[in-house]
Amino acid sequence: MIPYGKQDISQADIEAVLEVLQSDFLTQGPKVPEFEAKVASHVGAKHALAVNSATSALHIACLALGLGEGDWLWTTPITFVASANCGLYCGAKVDFVDIDPQTYNLCPKKLAEKLEEAKQKDRLPKVLVAVHLCGQPCDMEAIRKLSQQYSFSIIEDASHAIGGKYQGEFIGSSRYSDITVFSFHPVKIVTTAEGGMALTNSDELASRMNLLRSHGVTREQNLMTHEPDGPWYYQQVDLGFNYRMTELQAALGVSQMNRLDVFVERRHELAKRYDQLLKDMPVTKPWQHSDSYSGLHLYVIRLQLEKINKSHRQVFELLREQGIGVNLHYIPVHTQPYYQAMGFSAEDFPEAMAYYREAISLPMFQGMTSDQQDEVVKALELALA
Ligand SMILES: *Cc1c(COP(=O)(O)O)cnc(C)c1O
């Protein structure tokens, strides 16, 4: 089976992890800060906080922004459930903004309309999670303007987008947001097995997230309520979690970061080749905005079903039968039973539903060979015939 995504582990990566195994620190040593500094300087953010998953990063990001009971978090329905669940963890309510039919990202026009309506009803969101689907950034400038007009905070869920750029700057610089989150799950662009990171330019948000990822406990005197009782002393000043990344993971991350640019370049080569090979097929290829450089975590096609004698499901199954590990990113979150129970109905977000009826993620990973790619295209040709 050719998978839709796969990690790329080099000998140098393996050696970096082994070195940590033989060192004094398996956790809470020097590798985590090294990894954080490396990512922060690469993307141009002031602070980076490594954690054990992007889900954890989203959770502490929401908490740091003060999200709580009675508040609303908005995001796109076309994302992994974690982009929405982080709001529920904080006791907030979740709502969605439908997608743009061209980028499949949260649509800024629909966001503007929904904000105006929400203002009338006094239920404006406190936090918006903008997901850069497939690695292509959202229209952050427009979203930033709206956030100033309606006073909400912005988290960029850039789980798909490390190594990509928006208006010439690396995603993660957080120029248009409060916090940006990366995922290092093995299917993503850079991996630490499990892992995530929150980036911010705010000293205050960084300090809060730093507490929250490690039990709300501090050894920094300036964060304590009184002088330390002695050299052993620490204080718990908030209710935090154990969301720490290990040294093994951070060492893998540091080593992987050395190849980030190569990884993303290779993804672009593959995407260009797909664009070429699929050009006469009844599928809509991914559209790329000229102001951005996608991280290209995913290559999603949409079937032009009116030109095909098969259903979406049949094409998908025919691809799987031929050993092509296609996938669907994503089942609209608001159609999940857990969200349905909150009162959402499928057609609340029609563009998301239209996308769901046609989308297929083709295999896309840096280690993919041209032969493998040809195999995918041949299988797709057969599936569509
Ligand atoms: C993968 C992913 C997450 C969750 O990442 P983890 O590191 O597995 O917790 C969140 N949001 C999006 C958009 C993702 O693709």
Image (spheres, rainbow, N blue to C red):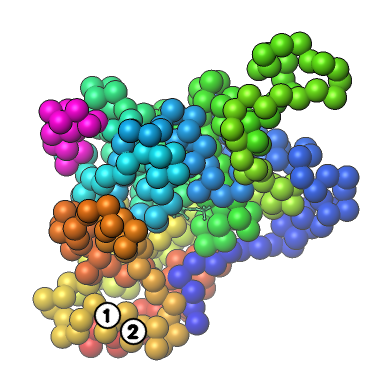
The image quadrant of residue 347 is: bottom left
Cα distance, mark 1 to mark 2? 6 Å
Could you say which is closer to the camera, residue 214 or residue 40? Answer: 214
Q: Secondary structure at mark 1?
A: helix
- Check residue 196 in the rendering and tell me which mark sits there, or answer none: none
115 falls in the magenta region = yes
The reply, left or right, for residue 319 in relation to residue 206 is left
The reply, left or right, for residue 255 in relation to residue 123 is right
The image quadrant of residue 380 is: bottom left
CB of mark 2 near ligand 1 (< 8 Å)? no
Q: Which amino acid, by three-letter code, is at mark 2?
A: Glu
Q: Main secondary structure of the magenta part?
A: helix
Image quadrant where one finds the C terminus: bottom left
149 falls in the magenta region = no
Q: Residue at x 23, y 50 (%)?
A: 99
Could you say which is closer to the camera, residue 107 or residue 332? Answer: 332
- Is residue 250 at all visible to an observer of this figure? yes
Residue extending furthest toward the top: 227
Give the x, y percent position of residue 106. 26, 46
Residue at image mark 2: 317
Q: Residue at x 76, y 11 (%)?
A: 227
Residue at image mark 1: 313
**Image position of 103 with respect to 336: above or below:** above
Q: Are marks 1 and 2 in contact (CB under 8 Å)?
A: yes
Q: Which residues are magenta?
A: 110-124
Q: Residue at x 33, y 33 (%)?
A: 71
